[in-house]
Amino acid sequence: MKYALVTGGSRGIGRAVSLRLAKAGYTVIINYQSNEQAAQETLQAIQSQGGQAELLRFDVGNPESAQSALDAWQSSHPEDYIDVLVNNAGIRRDNLLVFMEPDEFETVLRTNLFSFYHVTRPLLTPMIRHKHGRIINIASLSGITGLPGQCNYAAAKGGLIAATKSLAKEVAKKNVTVNAVAPGFIKTDMTDGLEEAELKKTVPMNRFGSAEEVAALVAFLASDDASYITGECISINGGLYT
Ligand code: NDP
């Protein structure tokens, strides 16, 4: 049994990644924070396509919550380890820096960047011990170019890209690869409130991407075909940034 943990696997990009990895034969551990119904829907969607999955609820931004959930999972699966980790859970709280409240800055950093530490660190030793692992961090175009209103989010995603490159160098010899994916505009709940008609004009492909398109890239990075790719940040944005 090969396990893949997808944080924020219940909705949006995470749901598409969960479905895709389940199709590739992984038992998918779907993490979520609060939307139980969405998590159940993703679980059922995987089961109805003949795949296997389980739910693991915890707040990726909370170190105790993450550690105790991962410890509990390991205790109930003593013979297994998580081979693929997709650090996908994320939020945005956009505001111009001059108006940004401390909580808007801190919550975004906690959820989008500190989560990398909280979730990756406990899973790293088993990957190293088994001499195989895949870590895929969902970053953002914003973390490469910066965007107005996103000092918090861009800082978190830029930090995530830098952490990806550092960790890749730490564990390369152990056959654990660490890569980031940087999406542009993708149609999910996160981009629901945006002016799609206007914003898509800025995209050379003249459309938002789909969660499934991102999931295909993540599945490739998780596969054996990507065994010599590590420390990379791959953009997927319809040509918005090259
Ligand atoms: P959605 O808002 O559609 O889904 C977010 C997911 O993350 C949900 O499953 C949610 O679970 C989960 N989540 C949020 N906070 C936490 C938390 N503290 N602990 C555990 N789970 C949490 O987002 P997207 O699918 O659009 O985004 C996924 C990733 O892709 C994010 O990292 C985002 O920054 C990134 N991204 C998205 C882009 C886009 O255009 N959509 C562009 C670039 C990057 P629950 O419902 O239970 O809260």
Image (spheres, rainbow, N blue to C red):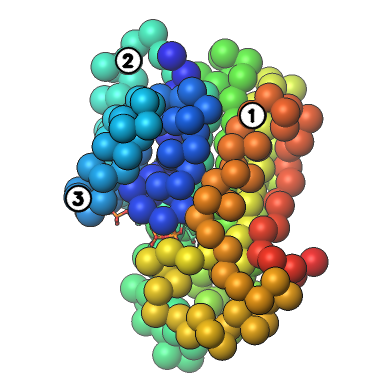
Q: Name the quarter where the C terminus is drawn.
A: bottom right
What residue would you read off at disc 2? 77
Element carrying mark 1? loop
Q: Is residue 112 visible?
A: yes
Residue 78, image x and y in percent?
34, 11
Residues packed near mark 3 inside 10 Å, few (<14), some (14 to 19) or many (20 plus): few
Q: Residue at x 51, y 81 (%)?
A: 196
Residue type at the position of mark 1: Ser
Classify 155 as above or below 164: below
Nearer-N-terminus badge (3/2): 3
Q: Is residue 58 visible?
A: no
Q: Residue at x 64, y 29 (%)?
A: 223
Residue 189, image x and y in percent?
38, 66
**Cβ atoms at labels 1 and 3 below 8 Å apart:** no
Element carrying mark 3? helix
Classify 208 as above or below 222: below
What residue would you read off at disc 1? 223
What residue would you read off at disc 3? 37
Seen as rendered, the residue at the extreme front is 49
Classify 152 as above or below 18: below
Residue type at the position of mark 2: His
Q: CA distance from mark 1 to mark 2?
A: 23 Å
Residue type at the position of mark 3: Gln
Residues packed near mark 1 inside 10 Å, few (<14), some (14 to 19) or many (20 plus): some
Residue 197, image x and y in percent?
53, 85
Q: Residue at x 27, y 37 (%)?
A: 44
